[in-house]
């Protein structure tokens, strides 16, 4: 400490008379540092008081942000669940459309196409999340389609109620028990397994164990049962043991390559009645049933059509392809029925 420099003396006297008095001396420099420290402390207090609300708001915002993130994750999970539900509903509606269309084609009922409904108004909230907007639009479309399918189902139910006899006669089930056959050759263009040349397959081939019962697919009258002689027709002789059933005036079903024939011409059969058993007679490389459905339009001959359309109790893998209404054999591609086989 420099001589002549002002010094502050601070004394500390304890309450007890026995206590020792303490002396503190503050030079000008020490006083300056003390004042600076006090000012800094005061400044920190002032700044802390000023920033405290902002800090509290920051903490609150951080908590809100964390909550918003949790809610966003939950909303995302819910949206994904709803999208999965919509996907499943769309697949189910597609299946119902296919089934309904098959029924309509089998019954000969002309139905309007199922129209898709429009979209509802789009709100600002929808625009904020394109996926949510798309889900809402899909839901609106599916709701509209459900209503249309319900209306078409009512039309079919009304037709069935007014035409019970036609309903019993129309071939509409599998000619073989479920889970006993495999489709080995579908309806349509193919390469002949015998000649290696392109030809049109006018029915479907269902491979099954020899002796598997073959059933009539609708009520009707047997117009032929047996084997067509080679001298009558080489083509029809290849069918081996054959049963033909007339279902009213519009439908014929043919069951070929049978091992046994269980009916005779003139017999009446109902849907599910056994007409024979799976065999390998005629042009056949292995036991199977060749099944045909022929449809007669007004003023025309019986024309082969895809039998899969008429098998309503079985789900085909390429079902949609089989539903094309024009899937009938082109004129030059099929052999007309001999007079002894057609419905009388």
Image (spheres, grey):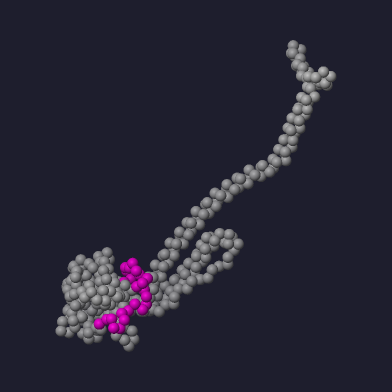
Pinpoint residue 141: horizontal percent, then vertical percent. Answer: 50, 68
Q: Which residues are magenta?
A: 311-335
Q: Residue at x 28, y 74 (%)?
A: 190
Q: Is residue 41 left or right of residue 246?
A: right
In front here: 39 or 342? Answer: 39
Pinpoint residue 36: horizontal percent, then vertical percent. Answer: 76, 30
Pinpoint residue 284: horizontal percent, then vertical percent. Answer: 19, 72
Q: Residue at x 25, y 65 (%)?
A: 180
* The quarter of the displayed image where residue 11 is located: top right
Residue projecting furthest to the bottom: 299
Pinpoint residue 90: horizontal percent, then vertical percent. Answer: 44, 65
The correct choice, above or below, for 276 with respect to 341 in the image is: above
Assign the magenta stretch its main secondary structure: loop
Q: Is residue 238 left or right of residue 200?
A: left
Inspect the magenta stretch and tell me whether residue 226 lies in it: no
Q: If the image is split into quadrants, where does the N terminus sit? A: top right
């Amino acid at each position: 400490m420099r001589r002549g420099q002002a010094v502050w003396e601070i004394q500390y006297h304890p309450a007890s008379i026995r206590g020792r008095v303490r002396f503190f001396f503050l030079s000008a420099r020490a006083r300056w540092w003390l004042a600076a420290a006090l000012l800094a402390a005061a400044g920190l207090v002032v700044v802390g008081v000023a920033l405290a609300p902002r800090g509290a708001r920051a903490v609150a915002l951080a908590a809100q942000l964390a909550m918003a993130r949790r809610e966003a994750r939950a909303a995302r999970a819910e949206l994904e669940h709803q999208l999965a539900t919509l996907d499943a509903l769309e697949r189910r509606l597609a299946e119902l459309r296919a089934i309904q269309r098959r029924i309509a084609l089998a019954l000969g009922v002309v139905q309007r196409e199922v129209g898709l409904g429009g979209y509802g108004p789009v709100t600002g909230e929808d625009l904020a999340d394109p996926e949510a907007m798309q889900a809402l639009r899909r839901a609106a479309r599916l709701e509209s389609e459900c209503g249309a399918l319900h209306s078409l189902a009512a039309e079919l139910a009304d037709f069935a109620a007014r035409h019970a006899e036609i309903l019993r006669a129309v071939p509409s089930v599998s000619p073989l028990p479920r889970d006993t056959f495999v489709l080995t050759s579908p309806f349509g263009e193919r390469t002949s397994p015998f000649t290696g040349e392109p030809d049109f397959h006018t029915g479907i081939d269902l491979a099954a164990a020899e002796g598997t019962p073959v059933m009539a697919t609708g009520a009707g009258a047997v117009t032929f049962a047996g084997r067509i002689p080679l001298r009558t027709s080489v083509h029809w002789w290849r069918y081996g043991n054959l049963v033909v059933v007339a279902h009213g005036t519009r439908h014929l079903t043919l069951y070929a390559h049978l091992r046994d024939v269980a009916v005779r011409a003139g017999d009446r059969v109902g849907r599910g009645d056994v007409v024979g058993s799976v065999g390998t007679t005629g042009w056949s490389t292995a036991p199977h049933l060749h099944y045909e459905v022929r449809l007669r339009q007004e003023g025309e001959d019986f024309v082969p059509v895809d039998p899969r359309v008429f098998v309503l109790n079985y789900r085909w893998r390429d079902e949609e392809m089989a539903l094309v209404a024009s899937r009938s054999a082109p004129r030059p591609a099929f052999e007309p029925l001999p007079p002894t086989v057609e419905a009388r």
